[in-house]
């Protein structure tokens, strides 16, 4: 069966069948995708991490008095 001739419904059925037989395949596939895209996304990931850190710092600053009172 050539991949060009598979319709979307058939492809979904094949993927579901594979996942039922071997659920860990999702994790393996995602890890491969992450590794493949790692070098391309370094800047994007760094910016995203920086944004998250800034948001956390703002929240901690905002609730600093509450944290101190709880301590």
Image (spheres, grey):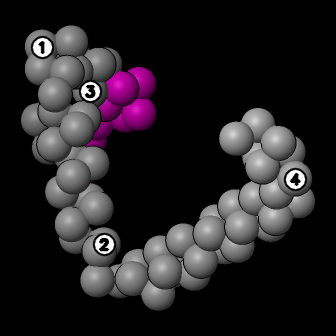
Q: Residue at x 41, y 33 (%)?
A: 8
Q: Position of residue 40 (x, y in %)?
A: 35, 83
Left or right of 59, for residue 1: left
Is tag 2's residue or tag 4's residue first in the polypeptide sequence?
2
Q: What is the quadrant of residue 49 in the picture?
A: bottom right
Magenta range is 4-12
Disc 2 on helix, strand or loop? Answer: helix
Q: Are marks 4 and 1 in contact (CB under 8 Å)?
A: no
Residue 44 seen by the camera: yes
Mark 2 vs mark 1: in front: 2
Give the residue at mark 2: 37
Mark 4 vs mark 3, CA separation in Å: 52 Å
Q: Residue at x 24, y 35 (%)?
A: 26
28 lies above or below 41: above
Residue 55 seen by the camera: no
Q: Are marks 2 and 1 in contact (CB under 8 Å)?
A: no
Mark 4 vs mark 3: in front: 4
Give the residue at mark 3: 15
């Amino acid at each position: 069966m050539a991949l060009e001739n598979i319709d979307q419904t058939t492809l979904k059925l094949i993927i579901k069948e594979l996942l039922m037989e071997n659920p860990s395949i999702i994790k393996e596939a995602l890890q491969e995708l992450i590794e493949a895209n790692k070098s391309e996304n370094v800047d994007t990931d760094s910016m995203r991490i920086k944004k998250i850190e800034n948001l956390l710092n703002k929240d901690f600053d905002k609730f600093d008095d509450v944290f101190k009172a709880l301590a």
